[in-house]
């Protein structure tokens, strides 16, 4: 499927690009008078039931298919007449490592060296093959108290792959960051309480905790949208294409055969979310009162209500809000697009977040 929108042909703003397993989404945004504006958006989606993907499944990796991804990005930009050349790409959760640990009090120069040394204990790759970035969580005076550190590590080979994609498309790769950071930027509001972000994609589900603008933990879980479709196909003895259609048509609705299978998979995801929230609260002593859902799977009929029921049935979570994240709340767009963008809300969260990074203060 191919779709695009062209609102402002003359804009030279910022491009956010989200490369998924089965789709590529692009947002072009600009900032005028201190306000963010949506200028263009585009998407190329492969048949969710098909065998083709934008990533190679090779030796337990999901390396990007550089040729096909570059062709798809170029096609979107040409059809939508996107003029910007400065691009921010998101990295899928399965291409990055997130770890947290404590460090003793020391000044920031000492801490920088110490973090790089300590990270070796946790990252299952040679340090020469990765690039790491880190941030403090909470404590700002590094010399007085123990320091909580969040480290993100990216294989250098992955960075080179994305550079090749950008070069092939004639884009300037300005930033490459984990998709959870784009998700946080688009969905979490300034005064939100500690919040759990649940992004249910095709290949994996990413569960993250965000507080005061910081990602405090992020976990990738390999049960996701693909398992709903494959589960239906196997249980009902039908092909994957028919299973995908049944999932879209019925969701958790009127077909008990379909809903029973979907509920089984979704319950696993929901239980994982609950477990991560409890572990975080036990460790940090902070209460998670909001869960924001995103990703294409969240558009499935009945999913939001299912999550709400699953949380309410456990006394521990009875006051937890379960919502679909509002990806467009930070960005202005023509009112005529209201109904269209409501349908795209879950799909474009990451791309929107990446497009807005350039305008951060």
Image (cartoon, rainbow, N blue to C red):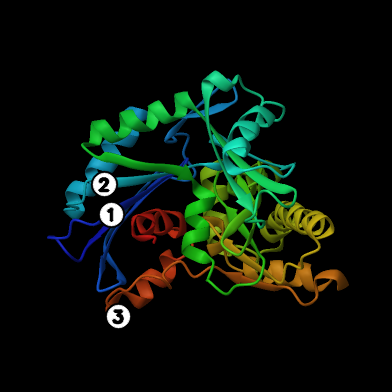
Q: In whole angstroms, how far apart are the C-alphas of marks 1 and 2? A: 6 Å
Q: Which residue is mark 1?
A: 14
**Compared to 288, does 14 lie above or below?**
above
Image-based side of 124 in relation to 337, left or right: right
Q: Disc 3 vs disc 2: Cβ atoms closer than 8 Å?
A: no
Q: Position of residue 17 (x, y in %)?
A: 36, 48
Q: Is residue 46 left or right of residue 257?
A: left
Residue most toward the bottom? 335
Q: Secondary structure at mark 1?
A: strand
Q: Is residue 24 visible?
A: yes
- Mark nearer the N terminus (3 vs 2): 2
Quarter of the C terminus within the rendering: bottom left
Q: Which residue is mark 2?
A: 86
Q: At 74% across and 42% down in the image, what residue appears?
A: 104
Pointers 1 and 2 in contact (C-beta within 8 Å) = yes
Q: Earlier in the sequence, mark 1 or mark 3?
A: 1
Residue 197, given in percent of the width and then of the height, sits at: 61, 59
Q: Position of residue 114 (x, y in %)?
A: 65, 32
- For residue 348, what is the image quadrant? bottom left
* Closest to the observer, 315 or 162: 162
Q: Which residue is mark 3?
A: 335
Query: 240 above or below 207?
Result: above
Front of the two marks 1 and 3: 1
Query: Residue 294: x, y in percent?
Result: 55, 60
């Amino acid at each position: 499927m191919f779709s695009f929108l062209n609102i402002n042909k003359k804009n030279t703003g910022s491009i956010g690009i989200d490369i998924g397993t089965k789709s590529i989404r692009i947002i072009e945004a600009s900032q005028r008078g201190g306000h963010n504006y949506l200028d263009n958006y585009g998407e190329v989606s492969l048949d969710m039931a098909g065998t083709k993907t934008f990533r190679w499944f090779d030796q337990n990796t999901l390396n990007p298919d550089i040729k096909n991804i570059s062709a798809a990005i170029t096609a979107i930009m040409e059809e939508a007449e996107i003029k910007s050349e400065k691009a921010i790409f998101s990295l899928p959760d399965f291409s990055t490592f997130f770890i947290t640990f404590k460090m003793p009090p020391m000044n920031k120069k000492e801490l920088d060296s110490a973090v790089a040394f300590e990270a070796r204990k946790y990252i299952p790759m040679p340090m020469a093959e990765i690039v790491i970035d880190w941030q403090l969580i909470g404590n700002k005076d590094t010399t007085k108290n123990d320091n909580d550190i969040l480290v993100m590590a990216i294989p250098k080979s992955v960075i080179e792959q994305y550079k090749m994609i950008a070069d092939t498309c004639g884009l300037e790769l300005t930033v490459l960051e984990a998709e959870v950071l784009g998700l946080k930027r688009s969905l979490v509001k300034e005064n939100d309480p500690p919040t759990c972000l649940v992004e249910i994609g095709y290949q994996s589900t990413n569960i993250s905790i965000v507080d005061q603008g910081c990602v405090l933990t992020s976990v990738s879980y390999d049960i996701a949208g693909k398992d709903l479709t494959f589960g239906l196909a196997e249980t009902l003895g039908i092909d994957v294409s028919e299973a995908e259609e049944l999932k879209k048509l019925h969701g958790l609705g009127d077909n008990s055969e379909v809903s029973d299978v979907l509920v089984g998979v979704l319950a696993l995801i929901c239980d994982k979310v609950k477990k991560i929230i409890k572990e975080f609260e036990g460790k940090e002593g902070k209460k998670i009162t909001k869960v924001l859902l995103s990703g294409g799977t969240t558009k499935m009929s009945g999913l939001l209500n299912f999550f709400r029921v699953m949380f309410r049935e456990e006394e521990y979570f009875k006051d937890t809000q379960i919502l679909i994240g509002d990806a467009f709340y930070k960005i202005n767009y023509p009112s005529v697009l209201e109904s269209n963008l409501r349908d795209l809300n879950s799909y474009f969260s990451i791309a929107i977040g990446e497009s807005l990074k350039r305008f951060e203060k």
